[in-house]
Structure formats: structure tokens, C-alpha cells
């Protein structure tokens, strides 16, 4: 089922206003949810909206919160998100990182006590739209066993790199698990096997069955021991730079995932000077002989096509979830 | 066979002086090669030394070169490595990134026309030893097919994160391929299968046979499409920030891997304040029930044990390569 983008956004805004979000904040949050679905990141667009609403109702997300600056030194700053909406806090942080980069070449903002930012690529794109390189990452509740272990103790800690490019920014937005939980849910829902193993069964064998992985809670980190190390290191950086909660603290709080820590970095760059180099790199990459007529794409390239189709034909929605939102 | 650390270092220094390295530079390079073997990174210690010597003889590495600063803006700088020894240039860059971070909280140095830095962890450790968080990455010659392609067009672009910690720094030093070429060479040499698939055979099936992967040149990126995207993005950053050669340019030069681009970032942090948080994170990670008596380690933890053993019993060396160095 497809719904016009503007209608999707308007419904989100209506619901958020009913939850006591101020008009501007409601509009901004609604736009981020609608954009995520529009760009094909359904798991963090419409599909996640009911969870967000639930968090607001439970008081885990405070609609009125405004971040406060805790400290500042040169090109780095620490902020407290005061448990506001993660998307608004994240957008605010990247905006500030860009301002620091404008003056210092590079800027780094760490924030504690913030909430799920939905799709990390949103803030990478934000930097790229402003003509800056953007890097950001977040920690999460434990959802990934460390290498050698069987119980989740690490987060899937999404990591984002964005590079501004005329004609379509390059945006890598990846969780450190092979599949995000949204993807596992989607494959399970469609009763399809995962294209590559995404975790372990109860006997410790790799499996492509999403339901099995959701049951064992043994998701696979990218690159096995490498992703396990990368996830740990990203949590350390987010926690130390913000002075906030680690994956350990979030997981041991006994609550749902809230009060997470995030880092936003912006770097000054010259889009005009870059154009030739970017073209050289992407063109060369695409000269690799493709396997079975597959297409070689840069991160973010496919997103533009999905966006175009969703804007033209309406945004693809899950009927049940859409009905749920209409009834809110 | 085991050789005392000091003897290893002295031999390297002797050879480098014979190649017209100034005494201090020869000593510094020798120490880095010896340290890499001491820490168990044999592939970029003794085992790589003959390749380095060959590069110097061919004029790809200039023993006398000193890096020159091209531009500076706030906390970011661009340098030209003038084709000097990659280890000396990299150490110099991290030193400067630390100096920038001391004044600005964060510092970022990009360098072009430099050479292979051997083990990237060396410069992560350097930042950590100074009490700073260190992040660095390099591009390389094409040695990894992009996702969907069959011919190498991306580099394995090692990425390093280091966090200072009393009692043993946390250092993640990873190539974006599942196995570095040194590791493939090692498994092939020992006639052992890889623990997990490391690439594809000629029919496009995943394989654990190192020799097959070296023949097809189809190494596997960590996390399949994710590592492919990550490698591309790291090359873009190294190239754009330094204004230097991309993997495309290095690969198309028709020469061996030289004149690469690298990025070094240091971030100010407070080791004393961090101690409790780091302990919390690592302790929690280690509470995951281990599989089959495996041990859960943080990146860099095992290195310290290898270092201790190699310092006590002598550094493990490949007899043939050691004999080759003695004969130089």
C-alpha cells in the first residue's frame, strides 16, 4: 500500500501534537519519520513510529526537553540531551558540530541522556547537505554477544559516514550487526531466509533463519571478531566522550533502551575541489566486472531511487501499522 | 625460532643504515619493525622487512624525505609525505594530531604521498601512550572487489581506534577484509583452513582456503556489503582530506603500492575520569557466558600477553626471513 508523503507526515504530526509536542517539534519529528520511510528505511520510519509513541507515553522520551551544554573545549563539546526526542537532539548536535567545523575545520559533539535517533543516516545527510563530511555513532542497549560469548553484552551501535556529493550524497549507515533488528523482523515477516548468515542457532551454528536469531539473541557482528571489537570501541568512545551511559549501564538499568550516548563529528571540505576525485573513485569502483549482472553501487545510491519512486507513487507502508497510526 | 628483541632491532637498524637512512631514522624504523614482531604482528614486523628494503632500493621509499605542511585551518592540517618512510611519516602525523588535540580538543592530520605504515596499531598506541584517543586509517592499492563485483577495486584500508587505559590500552587495528594478506599468507604457509570464510573461489562460492583466495583475488570484506561500503568511504575520506591519491590512482599508476593517503585523528580525554567507565564496559562485556571455554577479550588484550612472552623468551621469527635479513 502506498500513501502520499505529505499525508504520512501530516498524520505523524497530528499524533505527536496530541502527545504534547510543540508544533515545530512535532513537525520536525514527523518530517524525520516520513523521510525515513520515503528513503526506504521503513524500519525506522512508519514501522518504528508506534514504538516511539509508546516511549513518549511511558515518559522515556520527554517532548519538552532542550539539550544543555555541559562543557566546551576548542572544537569539542559535551551536551546533556535531558531525555528529549533522539531525532531532535541528534539534529541539534550535528548542527553544532557543523558550526564548530566551520570555525575549526573539525567539530565533535558528544551527547549523553539522549534517545534513539531512529535512522542515523538522517544526520549524515544533514552534514552532507550543509557541504560537510559527517560521521556519527550511537550506543544502544545490549543486543549482540561479544566474540566468544553467547549472551548480548554489546550494542549494534550504528556508525554513519556521509560525504557531500553533487547529484547524490554518499551515505554509509550501518549497524555493527550483519542485520539490524528491523531487517531480521522484515525477513521473518516475509518468511524469507537471510541472504547471508545473520547469527547463530541454539547449538552455535551460523544460520540464515531470522526467527532463530531473534530467539537465541545471538546476532552476528560484521566480520566476526572484528565487528565485536568495533562495537566495543564505539561504545567506549560514545561513553567516554559524553560521560554518559554505556551499553552496560543502559542494559543494566532494567528499563527499555533510553538515555543513550552519541557522538557527532563534522569536517570541513571543499565540494568543488572534491568533485573530480569522488568521480574518479566511484567510476573506478564500478569498473569491477559484476557478478551475475549485479550492479555496483555506492552507499546511498540506491536510496535515491527508492526516494524518487516513493515520492512519485506514494510511500510504501505496512497496512497494519498505517491503520494503527490512523487510529491513534 | 626466537631472537632477543634487542638483537632483532639492531639487525634492522644495521640494514637501514646501509640503505642510507640517517642514524636516528634508522633506529626509529628498526624499533617499529621490532615492536610489531614483539607484539605478535609478525606480518608487519620481520616478515615485511624485506619488502620494505626492496621498496627503498627501488626508490619508492625515500630515506631522507621530511613531510611538508601544505595547509592548516584550525584543528585540521594537510601534509605531503614526500614519499618518505610510511612509519616515520605516520608517527609524525599522529604527534601533530595530538598537539592539535591538546589545543583544540580534537586534531585531524591528513597526509598524501606517504608510504605503507606497516602496522596501523603503532600510531593508535602512540596516541594512547600520550593519553589521547587515537583514530587513523589509510588507503591502499586495490585488493578487494566491491560488493557485486569480482575484480579488486577497493583497498583493505586498515582502520584503527585506540583508547588509553591504565594496565593496557584498548587498540582495535583491523583491515576491512576479513583477513589481511599477511594472515592469508600465514594460513596458506601452515596449510591450515581459515577459521571462517575469507573470500570466494573462482565459481563465486565462499571458501576457507587461503590459497584459493590469493589466486582469485576475491577477498571478502567484513560484513559483505557493509565492509565494501566502509572501505569505499575510508578511501574517499583519506583522498579528499589529504588531496592525495585514491585507491584508484594508486592502482592505476602501474607501480607497486606507494604514495598512499592517510588520516590521523587525536581526541583529548581524561584517563582518570575514564577509568571507572572503561572498567564497567569491559567487565560487563566479559560476563557473557563464554562458548566452549573461549575467552572474551578486549582488542589489544591478547597483544599484551604475546608481548610479554616475546620479551621474556625472545621474539618468534620465521627462520628463513631472519636468515635473509642477517644476510643483507
Image: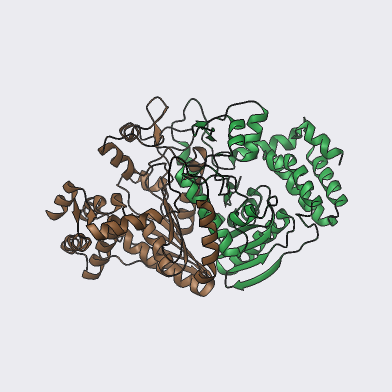
Chain colours: A green, B brown
Comparing B261 with B325, the one in front is B325
Q: Is residue A145 visible?
A: yes
Residue at (69, 38) in percent of width and height? A42
Q: How many marks?
A: 0
> Whole-percent x and y of residue A290?
47, 30
Q: Is residue B328 visible?
A: no
Side of A279 where B140 appears, left or right: left
Most extreme residue toward the left is B327
Comparing A271 with B211, the one in front is B211
Side of B324 where B38 appears, left or right: right
Give the quarter of the figure containing the C terminus of chain A: top right
> Whole-percent x and y of residue B188?
28, 37
Residue at (58, 38) in percent of width and height? A179
Based on the displayed image, in which of its 4 quarters is residue A320 positioned?
A: top right
Residue at (57, 30) in percent of width and height? A194
> Whole-percent x and y of residue B192?
30, 35
Residue at (45, 69) in percent of width and height? B131
Give the quarter of the figure containing the N terminus of chain A: top right
* Vertical placement of residue A249 versus A172, above or below: below
> Whole-percent x and y of residue A22?
84, 57
Based on the displayed image, in which of its 4 quarters is residue A300 positioned?
A: top right
Comparing A180 with A310, the one in front is A180
Amino acid at each position: 500500500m502506498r500513501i502520499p508523503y505529505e499525508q504520512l507526515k501530516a498524520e505523524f504530526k497530528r499524533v505527536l501534537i496530541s502527545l504534547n509536542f510543540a508544533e515545530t517539534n512535532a513537525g520536525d519529528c514527523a518530517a524525520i519519520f516520513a523521510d525515513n520511510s520515503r528513503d526506504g528505511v521503513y524500519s525506522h520510519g512508519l514501522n518504528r513510529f508506534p514504538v516511539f509513541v509508546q516511549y513518549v507515553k511511558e515518559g522515556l522520551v520527554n517532548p519538552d526537553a532542550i539539550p544543555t551544554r555541559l562543557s566546551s573545549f576548542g572544537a569539542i563539546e559535551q551536551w546533556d540531551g535531558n531525555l528529549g526526542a533522539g531525532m531532535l537532539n541528534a539534529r541539534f548536535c550535528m548542527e553544532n558540530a557543523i558550526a564548530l567545523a566551520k570555525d575549526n575545520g573539525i567539530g565533535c559533539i558528544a551527547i549523553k541522556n539522549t534517545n534513539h535517533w531512529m535512522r542515523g543516516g538522517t544526520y549524515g545527510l544533514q552534514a552532507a547537505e550543509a557541504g560537510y563530511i559527517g560521521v556519527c555513532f550511537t550506543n544502544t542497549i545490549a543486543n549482540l554477544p561479544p566474540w566468544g560469548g553467547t549472551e548480548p553484552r554489546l550494542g549494534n551501535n550504528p556508525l554513519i559516514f556521509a560525504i557531500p556529493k553533487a547529484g547524490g550524497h554518499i551515505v554509509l549507515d550501518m549497524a555493527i550487526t550483519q542485520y539490524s533488528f528491523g531487517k531480521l523482523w522484515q525477513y521473518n515477516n516475509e518468511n524469507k531466509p537471510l541472504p547471508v548468515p545473520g547469527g547463530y542457532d541454539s547449538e552455535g551454528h551460523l544460520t540464515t533463519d531470522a526467527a532463530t536469531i531473534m530467539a537465541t539473541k545471538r546476532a552476528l557482528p560484521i566480520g566476526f571478531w572484528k565487528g565485536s571489537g568495533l562495537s566495543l570501541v564505539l561504545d567506549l568512545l560514545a561513553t567516554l566522550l559524553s560521560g554518559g551511559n554505556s551499553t552496560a549501564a543502559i542494559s543494566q538499568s532494567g528499563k527499555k533502551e533510553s538515555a543513550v550516548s552519541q557522538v557527532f563529528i563534522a569536517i570541513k571540505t571543499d565540494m568543488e575541489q572534491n568533485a573530480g576525485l569522488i568521480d574518479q573513485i566511484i567510476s573506478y569502483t564500478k569498473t569491477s566486472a559484476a557478478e551475475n549482472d549485479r550492479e555496483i553501487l555506492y552507499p546511498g545510491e540506491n536510496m535515491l531511487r527508492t526516494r524518487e519512486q516513493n515520492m512519485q507513487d506514494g510511500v510504501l507502508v505496512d497496512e497494519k501499522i498505517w491503520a494503527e497510526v490512523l487510529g491513534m
